[in-house]
């Protein structure tokens, strides 16, 4: 009888420990989701964040934020790390955001691609931009996250973000291809979110 009682107690304890671990994991997941939401909001609000940058990140189970992406401003790279560090619950930040040196040709491609996408072919996406902006120029860059982010490095263009259809994804590629022969290569990584 004593052995049976001890065996039942052991099974109940293992079950309780497993349940506690599961509850803790769910709690950790909720905390990581809250951290991720706050980090995303803070980075999106940075004045240096433009349609020509791409910042993404992961939050590890240890609440460490791993920043990735490309930035045309060293200030964005630095400030993204600083705002992530200040979010409640963040235990550390690893910054892998790549700084991309700007050139006159790349800036011209950025402006032409932006205007082709947001002022011509896919103007309907302009309303989804965090900050409304009409016509990019080298003097005033389009601020905040955009549905279609335009990354340019040494004439190579990468499109990141989302569109609502495969047709819009193809149209974004067409818009960039029509910017005057300055583009060396085009990689379209847009995801289709509705269809």
Image (spheres, rainbow, N blue to C red):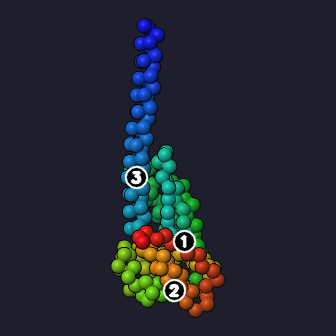
Q: Which mark is residue 33?
A: 3
Crowd around label 3: few <14 · some 14–19 · many ≥20 (10 Å): few
Label of residue 63 in the image: none
Calculate the distance from the C-alpha at mark 3 to the C-alpha at mark 2: 35 Å
Q: CA distance from mark 1 to mark 3?
A: 24 Å
Dot 2, how many residues are within 10 Å of its Cα: few (below 14), some (14-19), or many (20+)? some
Along the horizontal axis of the image, is 109 left or right of 14? right
**Which mark is in front, 1 or 3?**
1
Task: Say if 88 sits above or below 23 in the image.
Answer: below
Q: Residue at x 41, y 33 (%)?
A: 19
User: CA–CA distance between discs 2 and 1?
Assistant: 15 Å
Task: Name the residue at 44% across, 35% down.
Answer: 21
Q: Position of residue 33 (x, y in %)?
A: 40, 52
Among numbered discs 1 and 3, the one appearing first in the sequence: 3
Query: Where residue 139 appears, x then y in whole percent?
Result: 46, 85
Using a 10 Å C-alpha cutoff, classify the residue at mark 1 as few (fewer than 14 neighbours), some (14 to 19) or many (20 or more).
Answer: some
| Secondary element at image label 1 | loop
Q: Earlier in the sequence, mark 2 or mark 1?
A: 2
Label 2 sits on a secondary structure element that is: helix
Residue 110 drawn at (x, y percent): 52, 83
**Cβ–Cβ under 8 Å for marks 2 and 1:** no
On the image, the x and y values in percent for residue 48 come to 45, 72
Q: Nearer the viewer, mark 3 or mark 2?
A: 2
What residue is shown at x 58% (from left), y 73% (from top)? 100
* Residue bearing mark 1: 189
Give the position of the N terminus as an image quadrant: top left
Could you tell which of marks 3 and 2 lies nearer the N-terminus? Answer: 3
Residue at 42% x, 72% y is 195
Tell me the tag on residue 175.
2
**Is residue 63 something one can see in this rendering?**
yes
């Amino acid at each position: 009888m004593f052995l049976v009682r001890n065996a039942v107690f052991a099974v109940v304890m293992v079950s309780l420990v497993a349940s506690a671990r599961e509850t803790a994991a769910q709690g950790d997941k909720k905390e990581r989701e809250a951290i991720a939401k706050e980090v995303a909001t803070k980075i999106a609000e940075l004045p240096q964040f433009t349609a020509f940058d791409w910042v993404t990140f992961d939050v590890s189970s240890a609440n460490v934020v791993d920043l990735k992406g490309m930035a045309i401003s060293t200030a964005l790279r630095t400030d993204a790390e600083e705002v992530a560090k200040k979010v409640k619950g963040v235990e550390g930040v690893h910054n892998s955001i790549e700084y991309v040196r700007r050139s006159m040709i790349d800036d011209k491609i950025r402006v032409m691609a932006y205007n082709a996408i947001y002022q011509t072919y896919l103007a309907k996406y302009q309303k989804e931009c965090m900050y409304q902006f009409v016509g990019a120029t080298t003097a005033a860059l389009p601020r905040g996250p955009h549905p279609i982010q335009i990354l340019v490095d040494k004439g190579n263009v990468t499109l990141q973000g989302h569109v609502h259809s495969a047709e819009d994804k193809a149209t974004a590629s067409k818009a960039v291809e029509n910017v005057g022969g300055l583009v060396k290569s085009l990689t379209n990584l847009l995801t289709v979110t509705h269809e």
